[in-house]
Image: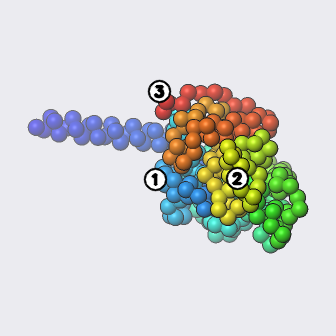
Amino acid sequence: MRGSTTIIAMMLAMTGLAEDSAKMGARQALFIGNSFTYGGGSGVHYYRTDTVTDLNGGGKGGVPALFKAFTIQAGQNFDVSHELIGGSGIETHLEKKSDVVARPWDFVVMHGYSTLDKANPGDPTTLIAAAKKMAKLLHQQNSDVEIWLEATWSRADQTYLENGNWYGEDIFQMAKDVRRGYDQAAASSRHIRGVISVGEAWNRAMASGVADSNPYDGISYGQMDLWTHDHYHGGTAGYYLSALMVFGELTGLDPRSLGPRERSASEIGLSRDQAAALQAVAFDELTAQGTAVAAFENVSSR
């Protein structure tokens, strides 16, 4: 009896050591942002919340949980955390959450308010200053950290409604303007690796006919709506594409290798054809941005 007890104790100890070893080998990724990362207004909001760490205790899943699911299927070892505040810019996280995010991360993905500045839409001044300060803070915790800025998408409500700040422009322009602001922010700090072109991936999806460009006049047959009901936040397809872009940049892996049977797609209500189409858009955008990605085998399809 004593021998059996000893063996069980040893097995439990070995299991604990194995888990600790896996944890120690995991790359630590942090997402800093707002509802554009936690998936406000969509089924992604509370997706697989048990797979990521919400540093604010809000129980959110969002894009970080999608990213985590992709990495598991790619056989990659990531621990994923997020610090997200609705309606915030990076400056808000600096003011209120510096003590929370000041840890030695391996990767950080962050973005600010959707119009660059809530009070002065289109003006990147605050974003540039905040991104530079946040990058310095994060670099002080780990000099090898990869810091990425995420340039977000055009808002349909800002483009098609008369009170929108991009009213009269085509749907692609806001994302281009936002990208320019993020490019300036990235150039302000040697600690920032680059910009993830999420907004331009959305533009590509619309330009290629994968997604509809105007949700106010109905969604064309066979096309996806990247926005949710408010035509402001992303819908499941939009957040899925966003997560694919982050996955490609951080891992250097080809999002198309996830394949049409990728698990998260079916779990959030995307068809196999839709998943494959969005993966192809992400690959094309990554390639256009000069990011080389490698094929892999989706371990969940074995």
Displayed quadrant of residue 32: bottom right
Answer few, some or many: residues within 10 Å of disc 2's Cα (few below 14, many 20 plus, some between 14 and 19).
Answer: some
Image quadrant assignment for residue 8: top left
Residue underneath mark 1: 50
Q: Is residue 255 left or right of residue 178?
A: left
- For residue 175, side relative to residue 168 (left or right): left
Depth check, front residue: 30 or 152: 152
Upstream in the sequence, badge 1 or badge 3?
A: 1
Secondary structure of residue under mark 1: helix
- Residue 302, numbered circle: 3
Disc 1 versus disc 3: distance between alpha carbons?
24 Å
Tell how many labels.
3
Pointer 2 or 3: first along the chain: 2
Residue at point 84%, 69% (across, down): 162
Q: Quick one: label 1, few (<14), some, or many (20+) residues within 10 Å?
A: few
Q: Position of residue 180 (x, y in %)?
A: 85, 53
Q: Residue 56: horizontal and vertical position, in percent?
A: 54, 64
User: Is residue 33 at all visible to an observer of this figure?
Assistant: no
As measured in the structure, the alpha-carbon distance from the residue carrying label 2 to the one carrying label 3 is 36 Å
Q: Amino acid at mark 3?
A: Arg
Amino acid marked by disc 1? Asp
Q: Please give left or right for residue 82 compared with residue 139 in the image.
A: left
- For disc 2, the marked residue is 219
154 shown above or below 252: below
Q: Amino acid at mark 2?
A: Ile
Name the spot of residue 249 as percent of width and height, x first: 69, 40
Q: Compared with residue 213, is residue 244 higher up or lower down, i.e. above or below?
A: above
Residue placed farthest to the right in the image? 168
Nearer mark to the viewer, of 2 and 1: 2
